[in-house]
Image (cartoon, rainbow, N blue to C red):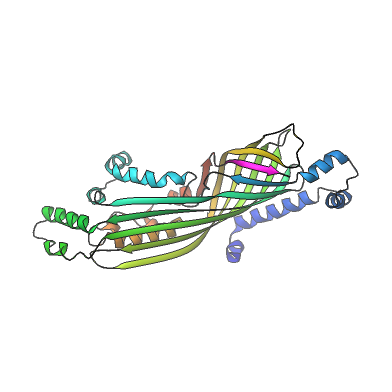
């Protein structure tokens, strides 16, 4: 991490700007008012000052799944989406102008399942002024996919190949299948972030958040090949770094109530950012390797899935973008 900061000029500039902004807003108070702020004794505009002193902390909960380096916001729908794509692979391939000759028949024998869970993002904000504060937050989510070909389906697929490739000698292979062929990939994603929150508008309800985030990804890919008998397991931990800007606003639920704790509903229009360090290449390589073991003896996966290095240069840029529409819907308590 320290080496990355040292070698990355853009990241150093961003870090310096955050540090400078922190001290600017901290020293925006005069020395007297700063001391009075923490002692709860304000000499000027005492009513407003005391009100601010009581409402300088915010705890926010985002009920939507977090965006990640490998999954967009609404990743809860991904297992069903993947199933739909596989079942209609020829239609999607035709629209995308992708040649899937040799894989569409293979997919007919595969049973695909997926699961997903997440912990809502929780963040804490301390306001140095009535409009500017420092935010920190954390979340977690996990997504798992499993591909399975039963022993019977493997045998049926091989018999289908024999029908198309007579005299290949695959007849004897059908009786040597030891069991089901499976592929299982799970990803646990733990994002943390710090940011500068700026409240605008007459009622401080327009929320601007500038973030720096660290996303830890723990991936586990396991395969069992019923034909070759080979079992593989790969566990990888990697980290992605990003900067972003989010625009949203909050609605005070009880604006006329002078309560000590004030609840509000908040939501965001969009978040846009960029990953200064990505993990896409590593994740893609691990999945490609696992699928190649999964399909060994049945299909040549390497000929169907190209290496990451062969993709056009703009793929790196596009996959490094962090763009979310309506990334937040939740609530905040201010006290």
- Where residue 191 sits in the image (x, y, percent)? 55, 54
Q: For residue 11, say whether it is visible.
A: yes
Quarter of the image with the C terminus is top right
- For this rendering, which residue is in front, 227 or 20? 227
Q: Is residue 329 magenta?
A: yes
Residue 5 quadrant: bottom right
Most common SS among magenta residues: strand
Image position of 145 with respect to 207: above or below = below
- Where residue 66 sits in the image (x, y, percent)? 53, 48
- Where residue 181 sits in the image (x, y, percent)? 27, 60
Where are the magenta residues, as a range? 327-335
- Where residue 4 sits in the image (x, y, percent)? 57, 63
Q: Is residue 42 magenta?
A: no
View extreme (top): residue: 256
Q: For residue 278, say whether it is visible.
A: no
* Residue shown at the point (60%, 55%) measured from the top left: 10
* Residue shown at the point (63%, 50%) measured from the top left: 123
């Amino acid at each position: 991490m320290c080496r990355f900061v040292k070698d990355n000029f853009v990241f150093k500039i961003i870090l310096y700007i955050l540090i400078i902004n922190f001290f600017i807003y901290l020293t925006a108070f005069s020395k007297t008012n700063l001391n009075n702020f923490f002692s709860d004794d304000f000499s000027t505009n005492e009513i407003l000052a005391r009100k601010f002193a009581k409402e300088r902390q915010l705890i926010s909960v985002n009920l939507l799944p977090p965006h990640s380096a490998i999954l967009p916001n609404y990743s809860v729908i991904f297992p069903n989406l993947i199933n739909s794509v596989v079942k209609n692979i020829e239609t999607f391939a035709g629209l995308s102008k992708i040649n899937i000759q040799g894989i569409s028949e293979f997919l007919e024998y595969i049973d695909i399942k997926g699961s997903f869970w997440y912990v809502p993002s929780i963040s804490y904000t301390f306001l140095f002024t009535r409009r500017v504060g420092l935010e920190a937050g954390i979340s977690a989510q996990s997504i798992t996919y499993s591909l399975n070909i039963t022993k019977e389906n493997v045998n049926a697929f091989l018999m289908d190949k024999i029908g198309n490739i007579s005299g290949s000698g695959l007849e004897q292979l059908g009786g040597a299948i030891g069991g089901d062929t499976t592929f299982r990939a799970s990803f646990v994603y733990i994002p943390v972030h710090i940011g500068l929150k700026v409240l605008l508008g007459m009622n401080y309800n327009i929320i601007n958040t500038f973030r720096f985030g660290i996303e830890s990804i723990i991936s586990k890919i396991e395969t069992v090949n019923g034909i070759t008998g080979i079992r593989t397991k790969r566990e990888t931990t990697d980290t992605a770094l990003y900067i972003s800007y989010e625009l949203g606003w909050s609605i005070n639920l009880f604006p006329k109530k002078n309560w000590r704790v004030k609840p509000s509903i908040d939501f965001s229009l969009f978040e846009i950012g960029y990953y200064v360090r990505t993990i896409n290449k590593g994740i893609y390589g691990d999945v490609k390797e696992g699928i190649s073991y999964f399909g060994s003896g049945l299909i040549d996966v390497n000929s169907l899935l190209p290496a990451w290095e062969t993709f056009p240069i703009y793929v790196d840029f596009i996959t490094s973008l962090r763009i979310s529409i309506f990334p937040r819907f939740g609530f905040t308590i201010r006290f």
